[in-house]
Structure formats: structure tokens, C-alpha cells
């Protein structure tokens, strides 16, 4: 949860904004990302999961990227894959020796094309160049959202290509320097969005980061009440394990 020191920030006009304010900030429908391909409905980060989520009507897919030992971006939450007792580390394994159900990033575009929003957590920073190269190859770079927990590292990636979307995803550590300083730093270093746990968002934070031109994404929104709350705050993107719950919530909102 956001600590008490971050509950308020001083706006430029000298007024105080309450970060606990739950009022809705009006905006268009958020991007609905199937987290790990919608792991609540199918085995996570598989082509089957991606296909099912897409068939339900999500706007985008979220996954994670590691680099195989022969330099291929692989979609998996964990570095170790396969059957227990015979698990292999992606980073130490050739793509040809990985389990069949573990897809490469290129497999995704080969099967589903370039028109979906794709949000990728970069697990291995060495994977960034190859990941951007593949999205560029399939003319999908403008719909690629790259997430990483350390913005001081990921800000350097903007130099690789100006057209992908760069997302700060600070996780549990939050932003100890303060929300306004983080928002300013992100805006000055080419970031497009910030991704916080759903329970950490308030209308005040949405207002703050929007003021600096950043989109606001909410992850870990799996229960209907969590999805409804994210919608009520007016975030720009929602990540959930359950595609139908997101779609139903938007339809009924």
C-alpha cells in the first residue's frame, strides 16, 4: 500500500490534492490486458491462453520476456520452465531445447499478428534489443508497452527506438522520492505510463501522473470489486487474470 507520506502532493497552484480521493476521473475506456495471457482461464503464457483471451475480446496481452541462450526472446514468467525435476533455465537453454508449450515472442506475432496491444515485463534486460527488433519487424512497435521495475535502467532503452511505449513498473518499492518527483522524472525521460498495483491507485495519483502526460495502468486487478474500483478511478489500462471479468465490468459500468 502507498505509505502516508505519499498521500498528498503539492500542486503547482499551491492547493493540496488528497490522494485518498476516490472520485472518478472521466476518460475513455481503458486498455484491457489479459495478464500472462489470462492465466485464470488457461495455462499462463501459452499460445492457447493468448488465443482464448483474444477470442473473448481483450485489447491486449501481457507477458514476460527472457532471453534464450541463443538470443531469442521467450515468453515466460519464470526463468525455469518444464516439468519439476527436469526444469530448464531459459537463459541457459537453446530455443530448440525448450518445452514446446513455451512460445517465443516471434511466435506470438506469427500466430496473432501486429494489431493487439502487447505489454511485456522485461525479466532479463539483455532481451530488450531483440524484443524491440521483433516488434519492429512485424510493424507492431507502436503497440508495444515495455515494463521494467527500475526506471533508471529502462530510461536508457528509449535511445533504442522512439516508437515503443515505455512503462515504469516500480512494484512494491513504490517511489520513495515522492510521487511528484517520480512523475516529473518519468516525463523528462521519455516514459509513457506508470503501472501500479490496483490497491495503490487513488484518484489523486491518477490526477498527478496525468498532469505529467503519463498514462495510469493498474495491475493485480483480478476480483470484480478490484476491476470495478480501477474503472471508477479512471485508469488507462487494467491487467487481470480473468478476461471475461474485465470485459463484463466495462460493459456494465
Image (cartoon, rainbow, N blue to C red):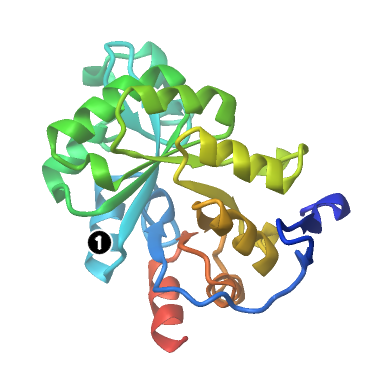
Q: Is residue 115 left or right of residue 207?
A: left
Quadrant housing the N terminus: bottom right
**In this picture, is 180 found above or below 38?**
above
Q: 12 or 236, which lies in front?
A: 12
- Residue at point 54% right, 48% down? 194
Q: Position of residue 149 (x, y in %)?
A: 58, 34
In-front residue for pair 91/228: 228
Q: To which quarter of the image does residue 23 belong? A: bottom right
Residue 174: where, in percent of width, then height? 70, 42
Give the secondary structure at mark 1.
Answer: helix
Q: Residue at x 38, y 75 (%)?
A: 247
Q: Position of residue 223 (x, y in %)?
A: 57, 70
Q: Of all residues shown, which one is farthest toward the front? A: 13
Camera-side residue of 167 and 209: 209
Q: Is residue 246 left or right of residue 168?
A: left
Q: Is residue 83 above or below residue 239?
A: above
- Relative to residue 42, is residue 17 drawn left or right? right
| Res 35 visible | yes
Q: Position of residue 154 (x, y in %)?
A: 49, 27
**Residue of label 1:** 54
Q: Foreground: 43 or 36? A: 36
Residue 86 visible in rendering: no
How many numbered badges does the structure rendering display?
Answer: 1
Residue at x-position 69% and y-position 41%: 181
Binning the other alpha carbons within 10 Å of mark 1 as few (below 14), some (14 to 19) or many (20 upward) gives many
Q: Quadrant of residue 92?
A: top left
Q: Residue furthest bottom?
A: 252
Q: Residue at x 14, y 40 (%)?
A: 139
Amino acid at each position: 500500500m502507498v505509505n502516508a507520506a505519499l498521500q498528498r502532493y503539492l500542486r503547482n497552484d499551491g492547493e493540496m490534492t488528497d490522494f485518498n480521493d476516490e472520485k472518478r476521473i472521466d476518460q475513455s475506456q481503458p486498455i484491457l490486458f489479459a495478464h500472462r495471457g489470462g492465466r485464470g482461464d488457461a495455462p499462463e503464457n501459452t499460445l492457447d491462453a493468448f488465443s482464448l483471451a483474444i477470442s473473448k475480446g481483450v485489447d491486449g496481452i501481457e507477458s514476460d520476456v527472457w532471453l534464450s541462450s541463443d538470443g531469442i526472446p521467450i515468453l515466460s514468467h519464470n526463468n525455469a520452465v518444464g516439468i519439476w525435476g527436469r526444469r530448464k533455465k531459459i537463459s541457459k537453454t537453446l530455443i530448440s531445447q525448450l518445452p514446446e508449450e513455451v512460445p517465443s515472442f516471434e511466435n506470438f506475432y506469427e500466430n496473432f499478428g501486429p494489431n493487439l496491444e502487447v505489454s511485456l515485463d522485461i525479466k532479463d534486460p539483455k532481451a530488450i534489443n531483440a524484443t524491440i527488433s521483433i516488434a519492429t519487424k512485424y510493424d507492431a512497435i507502436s503497440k508495444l508497452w515495455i515494463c521494467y521495475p527500475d526506471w533508471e535502467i529502462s530510461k536508457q532503452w528509449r535511445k533504442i527506438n522512439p516508437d515503443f511505449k515505455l512503462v515504469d513498473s516500480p512494484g512494491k518499492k513504490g517511489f520513495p522520492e515522492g510521487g511528484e518527483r517520480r512523475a516529473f522524472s518519468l516525463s523528462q525521460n521519455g516514459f509513457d505510463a506508470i503501472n501500479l498495483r490496483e490497491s495503490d491507485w487513488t484518484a489523486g495519483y491518477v490526477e498527478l501522473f496525468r498532469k505529467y502526460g503519463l498514462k495510469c495502468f493498474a495491475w493485480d486487478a483480478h476480483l470484480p470489486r478490484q476491476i470495478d474500483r480501477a474503472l471508477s478511478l479512471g485508469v488507462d489500462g487494467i491487467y487481470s487474470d480473468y478476461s471475461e471479468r474485465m470485459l463484463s465490468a466495462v460493459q456494465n459500468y
